[in-house]
């Protein structure tokens, strides 16, 4: 099923659709995994339950996050691609972009329990990816107007596994996630607890929690990009207080197998903004509004 959407105002030339859709699939953070090191004496004394408790406190507390129903983040994505093999790059993006080191404006919208929308604006055109918890869609800009496509079965499965608004640690027990301590690694030169998470659906991920401030600073996973599954690592930094909770304002993503790094810089965060349900469903008419000012 394909539905035409009116081309965004001011779009008069062909844009790099593959580049924008590839960005939609990759968002996250660079985090080179350090070799395991001997844990500090204080670190060895902490149980998983204690680490999770301190992590929740560092982020503002479970009660504060339970009062947040939606989050909008607005900023820039800076992408750098240095790929040794053009074949690998084409597998990821469908083409080799000469202008891959450009900034892309983004707006990320998340709403509990599992709704998301990502908008990327590049050279006057906007690509969209949205998920309502059950189904999703993409909007790809093009020279003859934008085209909306429903998610494939694989995209639905991938979206259902994505990290929710609260993150994977805050209420892990309620979510049915089993957390164990795998050891201590380094993230950006600092010691961090490496936690293994076995999700309710059987998927396994790892989260790294800083040993000093107890903020979760890295997470790993996999993403489908251009029909291929790639390991990714996401690191978080520039933590700031928004309302009563702590939120990272820098997110960096590295993709295994290719020399690609993307950095998201968040300039604005809006909590509990009123959101229309239509934001997360397949568009039926020209124009896609969010009700949240840019």
Image (cartoon, helix red, strand yellow):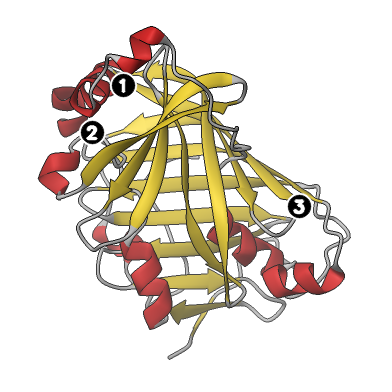
Mark 1 and mark 3 in contact (Cβ < 8 Å)? no
Q: Earlier in the sequence, mark 3 or mark 2?
A: 2
Question: Horizontal placement of 288 versus 52: left or right?
Answer: right
Counting from the top left corner in percent of width and height, residue 24 is at 55, 59
Quick one: quadrant of the N terminus? bottom left
Residue picked out by circle 1 = 59
Q: Which sits in the foreground, 292 or 182?
A: 182
Residue picked out by circle 2 = 170
Q: Earlier in the sequence, mark 3 or mark 1?
A: 1
Q: Which sits in the foreground, 75 or 49?
A: 49
Q: Earlier in the sequence, mark 2 or mark 1?
A: 1
Mark 2 and mark 1: span between their CA atoms?
A: 9 Å
Tell me what residue is drawn at x 88 percent, y 60 percent: 98
Counting from the top left corner in percent of width and height, residue 137 is at 42, 73
Element at label 2:
loop
Q: Which mark is residue 67?
A: none
Residue 269 appears in which quarter of the rendering?
Answer: top left
Above or below, 167 against 191 in this view is below
Q: Which sits in the foreground, 265 or 193?
A: 193
Counting from the top left corner in percent of width and height, residue 237 is at 53, 25
Residue 28 appears in which quarter of the rendering?
Answer: top right
Q: Which mark is residue 259?
A: 3
Element at label 1:
loop
Tell me what residue is drawn at x 35 percent, y 8 percent: 42
């Amino acid at each position: 099923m394909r539905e035409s959407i009116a081309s965004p105002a001011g779009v008069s030339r062909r844009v790099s659709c593959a580049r924008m859709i590839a960005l939609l699939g990759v968002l996250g953070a660079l985090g080179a995994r350090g070799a395991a090191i001997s844990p500090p004496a204080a670190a060895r004394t902490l149980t998983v339950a204690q680490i999770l408790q301190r992590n929740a406190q560092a982020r503002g507390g479970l009660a504060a996050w339970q009062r947040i129903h939606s989050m909008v983040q607005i900023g820039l994505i800076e992408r750098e691609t240095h790929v040794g093999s053009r074949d690998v790059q084409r597998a990821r993006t469908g083409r080799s972009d000469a202008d891959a080191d450009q900034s892309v404006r983004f707006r990320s919208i998340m709403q509990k329990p599992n709704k998301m929308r990502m908008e990327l604006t590049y050279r006057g055109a906007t690509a969209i990816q949205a998920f309502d918890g059950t189904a999703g869609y993409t909007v790809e800009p093009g020279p003859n107007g934008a085209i909306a496509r429903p998610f494939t079965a694989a995209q639905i499965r991938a979206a259902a596994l994505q990290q929710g608004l609260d993150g994977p640690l805050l209420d892990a027990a309620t979510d049915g996630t089993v957390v164990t301590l795998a050891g201590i690694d380094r993230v950006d030169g600092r010691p961090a607890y490496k936690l293994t998470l076995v999700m309710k659906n059987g998927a396994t991920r790892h989260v790294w929690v800083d040993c000093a401030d107890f903020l979760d600073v890295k997470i790993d996973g996999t993403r489908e990009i251009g029909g291929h599954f790639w390991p990714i690592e996401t690191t978080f930094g520039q933590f700031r207080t928004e309302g009563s909770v702590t939120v990272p304002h820098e997110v960096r993503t590295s993709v295994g197998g290719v020399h690609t790094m993307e950095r998201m810089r968040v300039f604005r965060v809006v909590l509990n903004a009123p959101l229309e349900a239509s934001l997360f469903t397949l568009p039926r008419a020209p124009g896609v509004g969010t009700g949240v000012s840019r």
